[in-house]
Every structure is written in structure tokens, then in C-alpha cells.
Amino acid sequence: MEATIEVAGLRKRFGGVLALDGMSFTVTPGRVTGFVGPNGAGKSTTMRVVLGLDAADEGTALVGGRPYRSLRTPLAHVGALLDAAALQPSRTARNHLLWLAHSQGLPGRRVDEVLELAGLASVARRRAGGFSLGMRQRLGIAAALLGDPPVLMLDEPFNGLDPEGIVWIRGFLRSLAEEGRAVLVSSHLMSELEDTAGHLVVVGRGRVVADTSVADLIAAASGGLVTLRTRARSEAMETLARAGATVSATGRDTLTVGGLAAERVVELLGRDGVPFAEVGAHRATLEEAYMDLTRDAVEFRGVAR
Amino acid sequence: MSGFGRLVRAEWTKFRTVRGWVLGLVAAAALTAGLGLQTAAGSHSSCGAGTVEVACPSAPVGPGGEAVTDAFSFVHQRLDGDGAITARVASVTGRIRKPDVRPGVTNLVSGVVPWAKAGVMVKDGTKEGAAYAAVMVTGAHGVRMQHNFTGDTGGTTASAPAWLRLVRSGDKLIGYESADGRTWAEVGTATLAGLPDSVRIGLFVASPGDLTFSQDALGGVVSAQRFTEATAVFEEISVLGAAAGDAWRYDDIGVTMGPDGKPHHPGGHVRRGDTFTVTGVGDIAPVGDEGGMRIEQTLTGLFTALIVVVVVAVMFITAEYRRGLIRTTLTASPRRGRVLAAKAVVAGAVTFVTGLVAAGITVPLGRRILEANGNRVLPVSTLTEMRVVAGSAALLALTAVLALALGALLRRGVVAVTVAVAVTVLPYFLATVSVLPLEPARWLLRLTPSAGFAIQQTLVEYPQVAAHYTPVLGYYPLPPWGGLAVSAAYAALALGLAVVKLRGRDA
């Protein structure tokens, strides 16, 4: 089967709140797709709809071209981690995976394999109730891998992880994508997905605001800006503003200039004899690009503290 | 393995890997056996003979294997081979003891109880419990033909005087009635298998105790049975085929002996020419509670197992809601109805096995302990005993399925346990501890999931035996399998509703 997730025109209302408002995107194999957006943007709801847990009012969600509810051994098609805390505390890690394996007709041997993959072999016979959040995330990932599925869908897998765990998951997700799987990873923090996701689906208020590669997104956010380093900040601002540029001070001796090409900036500064150390094209960080995109989509913006 | 088989296996793995649930079922079995056997070990019976304590004699058993009472006055002679007896019952009168009006002064009034019996009989000897067939006039139920304690057929004559005839042909007996001694009508026939050639044939009178009910302060019913005796006048007696030269003999069969070694409430007979006046006390009938303990009384601890099973079955589903694990379950199996069905199969199967082990140990062992302690235990067939054991296990299983479904519907453990106990155990309690009037108690055992307790009933209700047929004494208003079917219907209904709800909602 194809390793894809196709979501088209999903709408869902919870009481008076429109949780999904035409959510549409496709996750393709071979790369990690970041599913980012502020809290409440509809990421978890979308994932629950894909897994057949919630019913959408409109639209379709397909996994490998089929609705999830039509799958007979679904864990062999999609591995999902929704809530790492969803465990019976008195059951051991191995037994938690064992009932899941039995539900798919998988042997106990497969349980030991995924425990090994997730680095949990040494604690397999300990009660899951005593696990740290990081160990629970690993157990959730082990469960997602149980059926060796071509599609993986993880909701906020970085939550509560220590730096070592974050590094482990990033590497692990990349290697899963390199094996040709489609991997969708949600997060409300873009920084967590840096260096992991090759592709991004940015959502806000229940719909997609950007569906793009990471490189394109940064280029778009950097679009046309020039960074200028100079000791004579105020003279430079005066000169450039007179020429119609938008200038903002972004550091003690740094200005970001919009509306003028780099060559024109050099020419103007030379004419007026303003000294400068460096002129170059601006490169936005992924975080900046994300903030740009979701500024309007954040429902509960923090008031200045 | 089929899809459903995989689900059942997954749910079984879930169940067995939570130690608390497994221990809960072990505790349920242990509680049932422990309470039952402890109660049995604490029950002792002995009888007095004069000043000495002796083991109680075992209750007489009828040809059908049931415990019986076989007490009556019998004027009889020997009959070898085929023959017949004819007599006219001219009158039946009697005395009934009523509650004392003045303390210490016996209050005897004239009267005949409805099931007083006077008539002609053929019996395989004079031993209590021996096979018999008889045609009789009763106090209020007209002429009847009865045989071997449980068989009963009604005639047409309403009361004495009445002509009665009983004809023996091999092991077949035919009863007749007549208003004038000339035109005869058949009342009924009975086949007494294995009836020997030589039997006793004659006149008999019996008069069961007077049964009265009164309301007690709590709302329950108190029943009392008081002494009665009946006296019948027999005329125009003729016996065909009696052994030549054999004289009439009299036996007060089954008479109770008092502490002084003399008969307590003896019967008697007087012969004046060809007229016999016979007075009898007692009854010829199967006995219920008063004949001994019921095997199901060893299972009184089952209600504790029911409560434990309710808790475990509810948690089997509500624990998933509480932890959010239900989403993992439904992700692994998107076909939701099957998930609940698989859970019900597992909950039902594990509790059935628990109940089978618990009842399978408690009933036979409890009965032996009771008997070893000198208690009379009502005899039952192996099939009945198996029905009590397997039926109790099935009741446990159905209760587990109902509790599981309530857990799925209500999603909150405490609420579901409360509701489940309130509908399965509480009605049984209210109906069987004598706090309710009889009819409300019966309706509880018809309409609530407690109806399934009827599967434990070993006593049989006989229309021809006046007794206190109440839940307190082990008589349920529905037949055993009918009661269990009511419990099963509730479990199925609740499970169906739970499936509909689970399907229709976001998880």
C-alpha cells in the first residue's frame, strides 16, 4: 500500500467551536512532515479524525488511500502515538505491547523487537505506572512501530522529554523516514522540528496556513530584506529612510532594511559618507518564519508580561 | 485467527496482565467457598431420644428421589396380585388448633383444612416413602387421585359423601368416583413401576398442618403451621382379591414420637360393624424447606462474589476511559462493537470459570459437611446439582457482562459499580431477607436482573401441597431457566445500548 496520509476538506465543530475548518494536506513517504501550529489549531483533532476516533462533519481522511475504519489490522498500516500517558499503570511495558500485538495477530517475538528498538528492553517487565514521561514516550513509539507500518503519526512526541530523549527521537524519526515511511509529527514548537522535518504543514484555526518545504519557508520569510552592520546607526537610518526604505534596528549595530536591494543600500550609504562594516541578504530563522505565518492564527496570544 | 478471535485474545491478555483483577476473581471464588463451607461447618443437628442425643433419622424419600412426608392413619390388609377396594366416605370432620386466645389454653376449633385427605389406597408396604396410589376426598379440593407423592389428578365430586374405588391391575392403578355407588367415572390412572405382587390395600386419613400467614413489623411475612386432625367415616367397604382370611390391621404411619417415647398427636380408628371411623394427622406429600437444608444454601456467599465480579468487570472498561487507553484500543480495532463484544466474552468467560470452580467446590463439599454434622439435606438429582453449580456460574457471568456494559455506558467506575450492585444484588437481598411483603418481593425477582437467582432453586412447587412458597424459603416466582433468561436479557440489552453509544460518539 502507499505510504500516505491524505486529508481533504475536514470540518468539525465541537459545540460552538470550529475545531477544523477545511483542513487539507497530504503526507508523502520518505520524509518527516512537521505538523505545526499553536495550541488549539486542530492538530490533535485532525489526527483523531485520521485514526477514526473522531468523526468529521465534512471531508475525508485516508491512510494509504483507505479510510482508517476499513483497515482490518490497522497497526500494520499506521502507527500512532496520541497520548503517551494512556497506559494501565499496573500492566508491564511488555504486556501493554503484548495485548496490542495480539489484537493484530502479531507474535510476542515482535514485542521484544520493538522494545529493543525503543531502548526499553531492560525495563520491559516493569510496571508502566512507574515510568517517567520520557520512558512512556518511548513505549508509545514502540507501540506505534509494532505493526511495522509504512505510515507513522506522532502527536507531540517531544513533550516532557529531556534533551537526550529529544536528540534520540529526532534521529529515530529521520531514520524511519529514510526507510521510506511517511512520518507526520506534530508540535506546537517549531524549534523542536528544526533539523528533523523536511516538510512542514503549518496550521492555525483549523486550517492549513502553509504547506511547504523548510527551505522554501525560510526563503519566503527572508524575502527582500537586507542586513546592515554599522557604527553610525542613526545616520544610516536617516539616509535609507529618506530613500523610501523601511528600516528597523535589530541589534546594537545592526539594521534590517526592507524595500531596497543590497546594491542600492551600498550606493546610498557611499554617497552620504555613512560608514558601514557589512551589507548582506537577511536569512530568517525557522522560528521567525513560523511566527510570521501564525501571527494571525494564534487564538490565545500572551499579553506582555 | 479470525478478527474477532484476535480481539478476544487481546482482551484476555489485557485482563490477565492486571494482577488486581485476577486476584479479585480468586478472592471472589475464595469468598464463596469460604462463607459456604464455614456456614456448613457451623451447622449442627441432633435429635433427642428420651434424655439421650442421637443422630436424626434421615428424611423419608419417595420413589422419585425427593424428600417426602409420609404420615397418616392406614387401615389395611394384604392384597396379592390384582384386586380392588370400594368404599363410601360418608363424612369428613376435623379439628384445627388456632393461635391461643388465652395464654396456656389450647384453642381448638372444628374444621377441615383444604388438603385434608380421606380415601382408599394401595401401598407397597407400610414403610414411609413407599410407592402408593390413592383416590381421596379432600377438605376443599374435591375428589383426587394421587400417587407417589408428586402425582395429582382432580375428579369431579366436590366433597363427602362420595363413593371411591381403586382397581389394581399389575402395576397399573385406576381410580374411580361415584355419587351413588352405581355409576362410576374414572378419576385417573397411575403406573407404579416395580410394584410387587403383594401390597397393602385399605382406608386412609391424613390432615396436613394449618398454614397461616401474618405480616410482621418489618414488612415481611410470618408463616405458622399448627396441628390439625381429620376424622372420616367409611361405609360400604368391599375389597376384591384380598388374601383369604387376612384381617384388617391399623398403622399410624410416620407418627412423631414425643420425648416420653409415646406417639405425639396419634391418629386412631374405631370399627362399628362394617363402618370404620378413622382419624389421621400428617400429610402424604413432598416436603420443601421443613424436610431439611437445600444444597443451594451452601451458596449464600455467592453474593459477595457477585459484588467483587461487578467491581472487576466495571473496571475492565472504565479503567480504559480513565487513562485514555480506550483510544489505543479503538485505534487497534476500529470496529467498536466487536471490541465490546470481545470484552464481554472475556469478562463472561473468566467469571463463569470462577463461578464454576467456586460453586463446584462449595456445593458438594458443603453438602458433605452438613450431612457429617447431622443435618438433613434435601436430596436432589445429579442433574439438578449440576444445574445449581453451572447456573450459579452463569449468573456470575451474566452479572459481569451487565456490569461491563454499565461501565461502558456510564464510564465512571464508582457510578457503574453502584448501579450494577443496586440492580443485581440488592433486589435479591430485599426479596429474600423478609423485609418486603410477598408480592413486591416476587415482582423484584421477576423484573430485575436478580431474577437469575432462580437458577439455584432446587425445591419444586406443587399445587396440591399447601406451603409457604416464598423467596425467603427458596421458592422463586420464575422457573430456573426463565429467571436466568431475564438476567441474560438485561445483560444483552445493556451491552447493545453500550455498543450503540460507543459507535455513535467520538472516543
Image (cartoon, coloured by chain):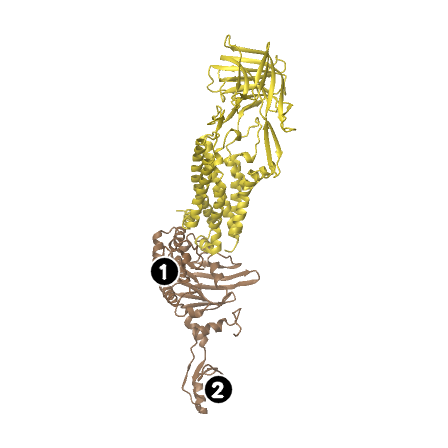
Chain colours: A brown, B yellow
Residue occupied by mark 1: A118
Residue A78 visible from this viewpoint: no
Q: Do tags 2 and 1 sit on the same chain? A: yes
Residue occupied by mark 2: A237
Q: Residue B107's quadrant in the figure?
A: top right
Q: At numbered mark 2, what does the secondary structure look like: helix, strand or loop?
A: helix
Chain letter of disc 2 in the image: A
Point out residue B476 in the picture as x, y percentages from the top left corner: 55, 35
Circle on res. B380: none
CA neighbours of label 1 inside 10 A, class few (<14), some (14 to 19), many (20+):
many
- Amino acid type, residue under disc 1 in the picture: Ala
* Of labels 2 and 1, the one closer to you: 1
Point out residue B328 in the picture as x, y percentages from the top left corner: 44, 55
Determine the residue positioned at 51% across, 15% down. B200
Point out residue B9 in the picture as x, y percentages from the top left corner: 41, 48
Q: Total label count?
A: 2
The CA distance from mark 2 to mark 1 is 55 Å
CA neighbours of label 2 inside 10 A, class few (<14), some (14 to 19), many (20+):
many
Please state which of residues B199 and A271 is positioned toward the viewer in this rendering: B199
